[in-house]
Image (spheres, rainbow, N blue to C red):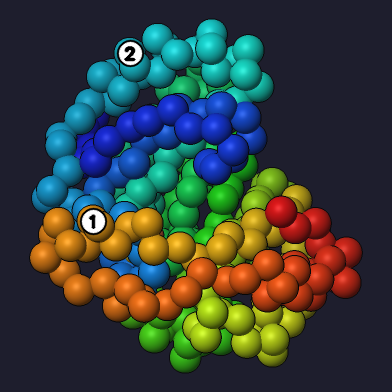
Amino acid sequence: MTGSVHSWDISTGTDGPGTRFVVFTSGCPLRCLYCQNPETWRMRDGRRTTVDELLREVVRYRRFIEVAGGGFTVSGGEPLLQPRFVGELLHRVKELGLHTALDTSGYLGARATDALLADTDLVLLDIKSSDPARYRRLTTVDLEPTLVFARRLAAMDKPVWIRYVLVPGLTDDPDDVDRLASFVSTLRNVERVEVLPFHTLGAVKYADLGIPFPLAHTPPPGPDLLRHVRDRFDRRGIITT
Ligand code: SF4
């Protein structure tokens, strides 16, 4: 079984709990204005990689990951663009006894089989806006499939961390944030909402690829804005980080 993979890495604190082995798959149907990984957009730019090859790497770090209380995360790009490959990968890593996480926009959630989700301990679900028109402007695709996927995960009682990238002028509208907080408060399986401040560190990748970075002149959110947005979730009893 092979898939198109951009890279893999060890990370701490950004892709699920603890220190994690993270595989970044290639290919994504979205084109988020604030994407920090444009080099993962096209599947054909990735390297054909077998599940066995990745497993050999995971096994090398297994002990270290276990001691660090971490696990394995498949991210992207959009992992669910390659559901059979990703399903097999999660299954084999689960057999090793490691904690598994899937980092997804949820847009292709319908492609995640129940078996794939059974091998997933945690879903990191990016909800980029609660407003369909803004979501489309931000990502080029529809919001509804992500909401459908979120409800399906809730019905399964699958642990979820919601991720929300806070971009001044784009995703900081109080009504949008309140609508998202209301939606999340109906999902009993959501353990936390990660409010992630927008940054421009990925700008250099756009320059390397010769693609204009649409938000090159957008500033990161200040501490007051971050606090105000987190407060709107906190008020509904939702844990934020
Ligand atoms: S879903 Fe993720 S990888 Fe795809 S364009 Fe958006 S931010 Fe980039």
Is residue 155 something that shows in the picture?
no
User: Circle 2 sits on which residue?
Assistant: 56
Give residue 199's position: percent from left, percent from top: 45, 63
Kind of element beneath mark 2: helix
Residue under pointer 1: 205
Q: Residue at x 43, y 39 (%)?
A: 74
Q: For the N terminus, which image quadrant?
A: top left
- In the picture provided, is 90 more to the left or to the right than 76? right
Q: Is residue 217 visible?
A: yes
The C terminus, quarter of image? bottom right
The residue shown at (34%, 41%) is: 24
Note whether 30 is above or below 55 in the view shown: below
Compared across the picture, whether 216 is left or right of 157 comes to left
Residue found 67% across the figure and 47% down from its top = 158
Q: Secondary structure at mark 1?
A: helix
Residue 90 occupies quadrant = top left
Q: Is residue 81 above or below residue 141?
A: above
